[in-house]
Image (spheres, rainbow, N blue to C red):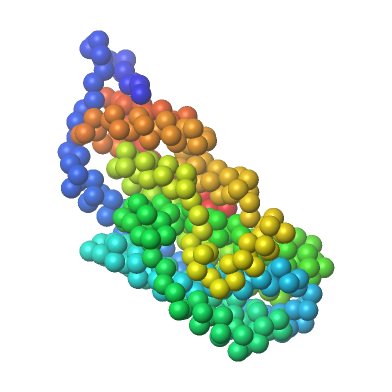
Amino acid sequence: MTTEPTPQSTVEHPHVINGPWTREARERAIQDEVREAYIEYFRKAVKVRNWLPWDDIPLDEVRQYGHLLSDDTITLIESFLGIEDYVGDYVEDAINIVRGNRERRNIQLVWGMEEAKHAEAWHLVLLHSGRRTEEQIRAYRDKVGAHRWRMREDHPGLDTPLGIAVYAMFQERATYFNYEELRKRIRLEYGLPERATPEERRRGYQVGAAAAFNIVARDEIAHHGMFLRIVDIHKKYLPAETLDMIFKVIQGFKMPALYLIPNESELKAALERTRLYTPLKHGRSVANPILDALGFENKRALERAAQEAKLLPPGCGPEHVAIGRSGEFVLSITPERTQVTPRRPQTA
């Protein structure tokens, strides 16, 4: 940790100006900025991401190309249906944890509304691809519904409003990556190039099930960006506990509810065969982009910042603090020159 002197300073040792940064002041500032994030998120959810699975997926093409999908691809889609079907449990648990915080409660409600469409999308893809009957899908979803998912049980130590946001930041990025990888796999099995063709770009949507995964992946990366923004806000006002929570999650992250879905063993076998999602891919395409968006060059820099944040003076506010990409804190007596403006989350 270093301090930055000013040319006008005549003191031998630069000092930190304590501001009115009580715990109450920090939480009030967080609430104000989270409200701004919520309004922007809600606006885009309604005006931009306003699709419906029953109307906006080209189901005729899903039926036309369904026979080309491999058994592993169908297993993956069915498994994602099971995971997405726990949205009610995710929302219920999160609302109970953030209870009393209106903005965070409402974010979870809007997030849940958008997530509910995803399970319906995978239901339609399985059905219209001709690979599962309506009775088979309903039986599968009934088995999923027979079990409950709990944040406190599945991810102990993260059962705080901050923990929910940090975990969701990683989980939504991981889900986006998985859906993008499966979209590419579906296009390959359809006999199409990885990227949309000129004809697909002209008409505005991809072919068959690839269209569904493209739409849902856009939701997921938007959700990731929203939770990343919330975490960045907390990092500015509560750096020590926020960085500690990020480090905790990155050390032990796992996708939710995998052990609860009825076809867990089939999913694991399909993932091993397809290499769709591996620890190496998680590091390169999930963890590293998140660290970069939060301003760190690597995991070592995050660990350093988490340790140094514990040494910050209690009254030190964000206008006196800057965090370098290597994880080093810089304190200044000239807040107007070192005031930190967090970078907007990078979502793709």
Give the quarter of the image for residue 307. top left
Question: Picture coordinates of residue 249 (x, y %)?
Answer: 44, 48
Residue 189 appears left or right of 117: right
Q: Nearer the viewer, residue 131 or 59?
A: 131
Q: Residue 58: horizontal and vertical position, in percent?
A: 67, 80
Q: Is residue 173 left or right of residue 196?
A: left
Confirm whether residue 173 shows in the render: yes
Outermost residue toward the front? Answer: 265
Residue drawn at (47%, 32%) of the image: 301
Q: Vertically, is 162 above or below 214? A: above
Give residue 280's quadrant in the image.
top right
- Pick out the residue farthest to the bottom: 135
Classify residue 288 as left or right of residue 7.
right
Q: Residue at x 17, y 41 (%)?
A: 22
User: Going 68% across and 57% down the picture, which residue do you hit?
Assistant: 272
Residue at the extreme right: 191
Residue 240: image location, x then y, percent: 32, 38
Q: How many callouts does the rendering have?
A: 0
Q: Position of residue 179 (x, y in %)?
A: 62, 63
Which of the 4 image quadrants contains residue 71? Answer: bottom right
The N terminus sits in image quarter? top left
Quick check: 51 left or right of 155? right
Q: Residue at x 51, y 65 (%)?
A: 259
Q: Is residue 39 visible?
A: no
In this rendered view, identify the residue nearer to me: 43 or 107: 107
Residue 145 sits above or below residue 224 on the image: below
